[in-house]
Image (spheres, helix red, strand yellow):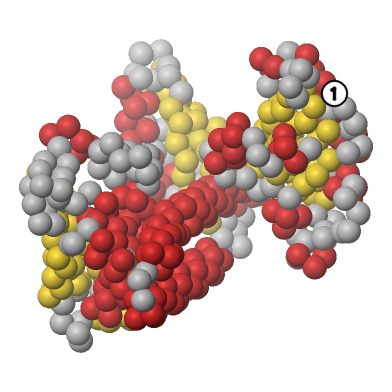
């Protein structure tokens, strides 16, 4: 099993393009045999020390009927791969609440072409399911209201005075006085008057067409209720507008649920972006440190004499410390994902730049790059430290990676305080970017502008998202074979 799963490039390619809430390997030849990763248990609320020891424990977390359905789906998929393996399973959280996981899978085959294992990426769609339940509940609620004819029915004359009001309207809003002959605007929240008058105007222009609007009215207990109304003009024998018929029903609960659902969707989208950002930071930033450490190890192996070995060993120690700092900062990002309101911290900008240059010192020396830093030691920035670390590492490592090869290469950094912000400039004289060709793609995901084999196209995407997450801005100017200049404005206003 290890040869077909642990070292399969198809699987790696599949996983690298999926941000999952768990992985599941299922034996297509023996359905009782399978394996799930630690993320699966974490999604179901299990801490590392709470994961069941029984390797088959995962079966008990999935609804048996749905597990049977999944197996039939897997069998059908093996027979006809074109239909794919994609379904939603109901699982049980450690605290007994339901967790809905969307399963997207692909089959692994042995040397004879027989499908032997199903590798499945799991995505937590519980919140989406809860939103669907909200919508279904609200739809059922209002369907019941309409079936019982619990609607408001009103009429007004062309001037907007009531000519008819049904009992349900009186009862619901607690009106004790007769409303006939009074202005209908008086029962509407004043801020909604313009909307009401606009719909009335449409009734004059197109009397036979229903016109819809949501208006707020004051309830008998002092609360404000939102009501969906349909206005339609009624013509007299002379062809002129005689009355406006208004039919309405309460949509307060619907609007509240939609607002909550939209808020939930917004929060979920923000969390997904932060999780993607975290994954990209790990892939991009750790790779930069890894390249530096690899070079140091090679230099240490080739060192001549004790003095050289001592120097390279000290540099290796410094680089590993920088890697440890980056990992600590990545942990800070996880904390921020759990608490989006966590305040930013003040950092000395020059000190952070010096730390980044030290982490990249081997590459800088190897490629004979001149580095100039003109940043006041007392200049501070208010940032998410992990983001600042990543921004500096991305920009400086890019300047090294895309350095000039036909002339002495340099990187220059300078910064100054401005009202409400700190502006950092990072300039190099490297390969540059063809802005006429690539300007609209500069900060896009997986966009590369040179032929470097290790270019992944995520660095600038990460950097832009991190700067904007701190309410800052980033701009780029570049010219092919002249160099590139980045200008980052860190917001100091909050």
Quarter assignment of residue 11: top right
In this view, which residue lies farthest toward the bottom?
Answer: 378
* Helix, strand or loop under label 1: helix
Q: Position of residue 422 (x, y in %)?
A: 19, 72
Q: Position of residue 484 (x, y in %)?
A: 14, 51
- Circle 1 is placed at which residue position? 72
In this view, which residue lies farthest toward the front?
Answer: 305
Q: Which residue sits at x=55%, y=41%?
A: 16
Crowding near pointer 1: few (<14 within 10 Å), some, many (20+)? few
Q: Position of residue 145 (x, y in %)?
A: 70, 37
Question: Left of 194 or right of it: where is 41?
Answer: right
Q: Position of residue 235 (x, y in %)?
A: 41, 18
User: Closer to the camera, 189 or 21?
Assistant: 21
Quadrant location, the N terminus: top right
Residue 271 in sight from this viewpoint: yes
User: Closer to the camera, 64 or 244?
Assistant: 64
User: Closer to the camera, 335 or 125?
Assistant: 335
Quadrant location, the C terminus: bottom left
Q: Is residue 34 above or below residue 284?
A: above
Q: Which residue sits at x=88%, y=44%?
A: 59
Q: Which residue sits at x=51%, y=35%?
A: 229
User: Closer to the camera, 155 or 342?
Assistant: 342
Q: Is residue 352 above or below residue 296?
A: below
Question: Left of 472 or right of it: where is 68?
Answer: right
Residue 332 in sight from this viewpoint: no
How many numbered circles are shown?
A: 1
Q: Is residue 493 above or below residue 425?
A: below
Question: Left of 34 or right of it: where is 138?
Answer: left
Q: Which residue sits at x=11%, y=53%?
A: 429
Quarter assignment of residue 448: top left
């Amino acid at each position: 099993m290890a040869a077909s799963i642990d070292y399969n490039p198809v699987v790696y390619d599949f996983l690298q393009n999926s941000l999952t809430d768990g992985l599941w390997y299922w034996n297509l030849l023996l359905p009782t045999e399978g394996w799930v990763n630690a993320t699966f248990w974490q999604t179901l609320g299990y801490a590392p020390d709470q994961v069941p020891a029984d390797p088959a424990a995962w079966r008990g977390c999935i609804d048996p009927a749905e597990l049977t359905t999944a197996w039939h789906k897997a069998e059908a998929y093996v027979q006809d791969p074109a239909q794919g393996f994609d379904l939603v399973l109901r699982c049980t959280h450690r605290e007994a609440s339901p967790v809905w996981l969307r399963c997207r899978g692909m089959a692994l085959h042995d040397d004879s072409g027989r499908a032997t294992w199903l590798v499945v990426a799991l995505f937590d769609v519980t919140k989406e399911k809860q939103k669907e339940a909200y919508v279904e509940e609200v739809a059922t609620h209002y369907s019941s209201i309409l079936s019982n004819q619990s609607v408001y029915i009103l009429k007004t004359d062309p001037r907007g005075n009531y000519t008819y009001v049904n009992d349900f309207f009186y009862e619901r809003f607690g009106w004790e006085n007769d409303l006939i002959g009074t202005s209908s605007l008086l029962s509407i929240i004043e801020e909604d008057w313009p909307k009401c008058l606009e719909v009335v105007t449409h009734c004059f222009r197109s009397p036979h067409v229903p016109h819809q609007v949501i208006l707020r009215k004051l309830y008998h207990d002092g609360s404000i209720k939102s009501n969906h109304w349909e206005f339609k003009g009624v013509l007299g024998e002379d062809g002129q507008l005689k009355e406006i018929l208004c039919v309405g029903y309460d949509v307060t609960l619907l609007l509240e649920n939609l607002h909550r659902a939209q808020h939930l969707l917004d929060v979920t989208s923000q969390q997904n972006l932060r999780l993607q950002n975290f994954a990209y930071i790990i892939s991009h930033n750790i790779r930069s440190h890894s390249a530096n450490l690899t070079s140091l190890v090679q230099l240490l192996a080739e060192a001549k004499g004790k003095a050289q070995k001592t120097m390279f060993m000290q540099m290796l120690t410094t680089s590993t410390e920088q890697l440890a700092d980056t990992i600590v900062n990545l942990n800070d990002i996880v904390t921020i994902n759990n608490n989006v309101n966590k305040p930013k911290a003040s950092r000395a900008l020059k000190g952070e730049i010096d730390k980044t240059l030290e982490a990249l010192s081997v590459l800088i020396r190897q490629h004979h790059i001149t580095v100039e830093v003109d940043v006041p030691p007392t200049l501070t920035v208010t940032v998410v430290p992990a983001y600042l670390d990543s921004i500096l590492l991305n920009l400086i490592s890019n300047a090294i990676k895309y350095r000039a090869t036909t002339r002495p290469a340099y990187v220059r950094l300078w910064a100054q305080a401005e009202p409400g912000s700190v502006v950092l400039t990072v300039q190099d004289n490297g390969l540059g970017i063809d802005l006429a060709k690539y300007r609209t793609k500069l900060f896009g995901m997986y966009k590369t502008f040179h032929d470097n084999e290790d270019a992944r196209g995520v660095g600038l995407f990460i950097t832009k998202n991190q700067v904007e997450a701190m309410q800052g801005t980033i701009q780029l100017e570049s010219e092919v074979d002249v160099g590139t200049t980045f200008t980052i404005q860190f917001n100091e206003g909050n």
